[in-house]
Image (cartoon, rainbow, N blue to C red):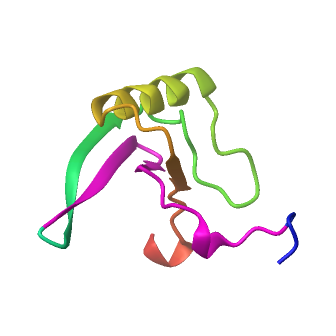
Amino acid sequence: MSRWSFDLTEAPPPDAAVEIAARHVSAATIGRRGGQAVVTAYAVEPLPEAAVVPSLTSQNVHDRALASAAVAKVLEAVGRPKRVGLGFRIPSRRSR
């Protein structure tokens, strides 16, 4: 590999995962106990309706201040991790 290459298999996993959904933001951290992966911390912060609107074709976050505050709260609750994986939940039309 050249010195400018990047291999995802060599990157350390994130310290926490954050999910942003239409009605809440959640975060979790995972640790190891006895060789098993376990959830070590979990937090959920509700969002008011229309702060985040799932869409594949338009803007998702309609109230950036509320969404940012919710992300900050859940990260604080799970111990302010340094590396975070982020995901948006966008429901499919089939699930409606």
Look at the image and say whether residue 13 sits in the magenta stretch. yes
70 or 39, nearer to the observer: 39
Relative to residue 32, is residue 95 drawn left or right?
Answer: right
Q: Position of residue 46 (x, y in %)?
A: 34, 34
Q: Residue at x 76, y 67 (%)?
A: 6
Which residue is more in the foreground, 1 or 60? 1
Is residue 37 depicted above or below 22 in this figure?
A: below
- Residue 83 appears left or right of 29: right
**Does the segment drawn in magenta span residue 8?**
yes
x 37%, y 26%: residue: 73
| Residue drawn 75% across the image and 50% down it | 58
Q: Residue at x 76, y 58 (%)?
A: 57
Residue 27 is situated, as x and y percent measured from the top left of the image, at 36, 45
- List x then y, in percent, for residue 30: 29, 56
Q: Position of residue 18 (x, y in %)?
A: 44, 48
Quadrant that contains the C terminus? bottom left
Seen from the viewer's position, the closer of residues 72 and 5 is: 5
Q: Is residue 28 above or below residue 1?
A: above
- Count the marks: 0
90 sits to left or right of 43: right
Residue span colored magenta = 5-33
Q: Quadrant of residue 55?
A: bottom right
Image quadrant holding the N terminus, namely bottom right
